Image (cartoon, rainbow, N blue to C red):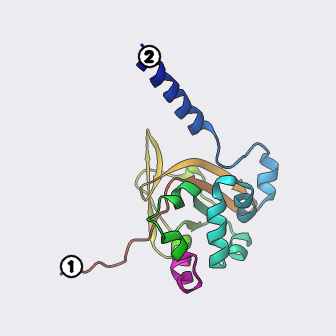
Amino acid sequence: MKTVKILGIAVLALFYLAATPIVNTDNEKHNHDSDIVELAVQADGLSTLVAAVEAAGLVETLQSEGPFTVFAPTNEAFDALPEGTLESLLLEENRDQLIEILTYHVVSGKVMSSDLSDGMTAETVQGTAISINVSDYGVSVDGASVVQADIEASNGVVHVIDQVILPRPETESSY
């Protein structure tokens, strides 16, 4: 009986955490007035993404007219990268690699979750396509789960994801 109670409490805690937004969208008008960067700055759960966008010099781009669709990794997604990876990417000498990774998270145009279908692909600003999967369990982008969708900004939309997605090499050689 004690195990059942503990399990029940754990399940309730998971539901609570799943229902807790990473980006506070209580004030919809405020979000619509904020551009993508301002929206990310306001969200505690996206501060690492903001630091990466600043280090890559992409702030002005993501504040431009757009529209853009951004698949925004959470702080926890960046924390899950191998130790030292983020710190290395934030160094000036690795700026091109950081830009490549960040622009892989951006699609031109405003793509709402209702526009997505299973098996579709979308060309990223980086130049290669991401894969979208839609199932009874939710939406995933290159294997990263969308944990919060359709956060509208003045110049596009943000979908929060639980992993940093990485561009696949265009060609792989086999030896």
- Residue occupied by mark 1: 174
For the C terminus, the image quarter is bottom left
Quarter holding the N terminus is: top left
Left or right: 66, with 74 as reference point: right
Q: Give the range drawn in magenta.
A: 89-99
- Is 48 or 29 nearer to us in this picture? 48
For label 2, the crowd category at 10 Å Cα-Cα, with few meaning under 14, some 14 to 19 and many 20 or more, is few
In the structure shown, which secondary structural element does the residue marked by tag 1 occupy?
loop
Up-down: is 145 above or below 61?
above
| Residue 94, percent from left and from top | 53, 82
Residue shown at 52% from the left, 76% from the top: 88
Tell me if residue 91 comes above or below residue 11 in the rendering. below
Q: Position of residue 135 (x, y in %)?
A: 42, 43
One can see residue 101 in this view: yes
Rate crowding at label 1 as few (under 14), some (14 to 19) or many (20 or more) other CA atoms within 10 Å.
few
> Which mark is drawn over residue 149?
none
Say what secondary structure mark 2 lies in. Answer: helix
* In the foreground, 82 or 15: 82
- Residue linked to disc 2: 2
